[in-house]
Amino acid sequence: TKALTVLGIESSCDDTAAAVLRGSDILASVVYGQTALHADFGGVVPEIAARAHAEKLDHCIEEAMGKAGVTLQDIDGIAVTAGPGLIGGVLSGVMCAKGLAAATGLPLIGVNHLAGHALTPRLTDQVTYPYLMLLVSGGHCQFLIVSDYDSYQRIGGTIDDAPGEAFDKTARILGLPQPGGPSVENAAKRGDPKRFNLPRPLLNQPGCDMSFSGLKTAILRARDAIIAEKEGLTVQDQADLCAGFQAAACDVLTEKTRRALDIYLGLNPAVPTFAIAGGVAANTAIRAALMQLCSETDTRWVAPPLALCTDNAAMIAYAGLERLQHGETDDLTLSARPRWPL
Ligand code: KG4
Ligand code: ZN
């Protein structure tokens, strides 16, 4: 049978993205980030994001189709993120996809953004169900057992901030540039992780839930204690606080992953597999700790290329493709959902 060709559209947060997928070949994947537009505001401003998506989407789709060398005649379906996310942005994408579907008569497939992330290891590494997934980014933090394209079991996650958000806030508190993940990781290399006694929230509680907001507050207190004694932070103070923060975040993620793996391995999967996705997957220390855990438990470690771990439309096209292959499509009443648990 001929491989299906799917156009994917993503606009649920601060990236406008379009991609063309044929089977498991990514023919093109275009991402326009909006970081610069939101830089002055200390976070994503929903109104600005929605307007920028609406302005950029057509161009982004044309560029992806041009790069892929396809026209609408070559497309078998249009997959679009229908939630969860910032409603204005999701609406921009859904409207755009509906317009295309109405004009061409092509099948429309609404995709859950989290399913896009969760299915990425199948696109990149052909993993088999069931696998354990840790989604860890600026907006997400959860453990999922993925048993089929439409079957996800959430076995834990953050009860407050996502780790990426905590990295970003830590950077802000310490006067380091955004995004905070890379700057904290970089500063941590020259720091002493033991100088400050930082909490590991929920570490000793049963289950796989996590918490990161107390850790961020502890960084704030430690910083204020230093400033109360002398003029400001030295580069060494910054490095030690970053190293302490990263070690604590890493300990929490590692210990909770150990427990999630326990639950997952109890299902006796044929090919035990642990996959990671989200921007925090870029962190070398966290990656190393999780890889080590996989090798201790004879579990296959899968980390898709970073460009596919962060928000993109190839993952949306792929999740759409899996639904399309099962004959599942939506009609033009498809609605945008700000909240949409898997
Ligand atoms: O997946 P992503 O691009 O966007 C969403 O949040 O959906 O993830 C971005 C997050 C940011 O919070 C960023 O600080 C974090 O991933 N991040 C990192 C690193 N690189 C990016 N966190 C820790 N260490 C890194 N090296
Ligand atoms: Zn995402």
Image (spheres, grey):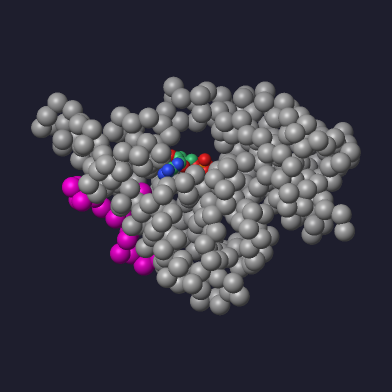
In the figure, is residue 309 to the left or right of 105?
Answer: left
14 shown above or below 280:
above
Q: Which residue is found at the position 25% from the left and 43% from the top?
A: 191
Q: Residue at x 52, y 23 (%)?
A: 37
Q: Characterize the magenta stretch by its predominant secondary structure.
A: loop
Residue 73 place in picture, x, y as percent: 89, 38
Quarter placement of the N terminus: bottom right
User: From the viewer's perspective, is residue 231 above or below residue 83?
Assistant: above
Looking at the rendering, the stretch of residues picked out in magenta corresponds to 194-212
Query: Residue farthest to the front?
Result: 190
Vertical side of 262 occupied by 102: above or below: above
Question: Looking at the picture, how far across and down is residue 220, in whole percent?
Answer: 25, 38
Query: Is residue 210 magenta-colored?
Result: yes
Displayed quadrant of residue 65: top right
Residue 331 visible in the displayed image: no
Rendered-image quadrant of the C terminus: bottom right
Give the residue at x 55% y 28%.
34
Q: How many marks?
A: 0
Relative side of 225 to 180, left or right: left
Of residues 93 and 122, the one drawn nearer to the viewer in this rendering: 122
